[in-house]
Image (spheres, rainbow, N blue to C red):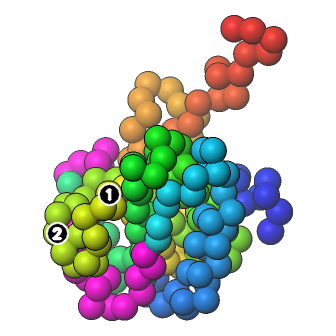
Amino acid sequence: MDVETAIMKRRAIRRFNQKSVPIDVLKKLVDAARLAPSGANLQPLQYIVVNDSDLLAKIFSTLSWAGYLKPAWRPAENERPTAYIVILTNEKLSPYCEIDVGLAAENIMLMAVSTGLGSCMIRKMDKDKLRQILKVPDRFDINTIIALGYPSEEPILEELKDSVEYWRDEEGNLHVPKRKLEDILHINGY
């Protein structure tokens, strides 16, 4: 898959089939993250990959899902992620951690699309509980979790009209509004 196709196809996936993700694929995703640009090349990020079924269930219990969907929504048991990549930061090593996370996470998610996986970047979680589950040393912050698995949904892009909030229709399809290019693009000045 070429880069343009991967970019156009990548969407947040919140429903997964229950096929497990092989560890070699997860390593490939972390390798893509490792190669992302890093502010001053300080490389402050660490990664935990998880595909163990007991740990998957424990991690799932710490996460919040799809804040715009009302009533509150979470993937059903047969739709849950089958792998996670947890991105850890160490602010003492670099003042650019947040930028580095964004770059690394996008590399992970684009590589995921190219291998047939879906992904969802999650920032709302119970970090204390997650730290205990994964035995994360105190020197690291749990910054982001990327939920992964083989997708069982295909979100539909919509032209942004009144709201940025995504929604599910009567059939359960996820609709995601995006701004039009001409609404955000300014050439040679604003």
At mark 2, the secondary structure is helix
Q: Is residue 161 above or below residue 169?
A: above
Residue at 51% x, 42% y: name it: 96
Q: Does the magenta run of residues contain 13?
A: no
At mark 1, the secondary structure is strand
User: Front-most of 91 and 118?
Assistant: 91
| Residue positioned most to the front | 92
The answer to whether one can see residue 65 in this image is no
Residue 150 as seen in the image, left or right of residue 48: right
Q: What is the C-alpha distance between the residues marked 1 and 2?
A: 13 Å
Question: What x and y, as percent, mark residue 126?
Answer: 19, 61
Residue at 75% x, 9% y: name it: 189
Magenta range is 48-71
| Residue positioned most to the top | 190
Number of other residues with Cα within 10 Å of mark 1, as a class: few under 14, some 14 to 19, many 20 or more: some
Question: What x and y, as percent, mark residue 46?
Answer: 47, 67
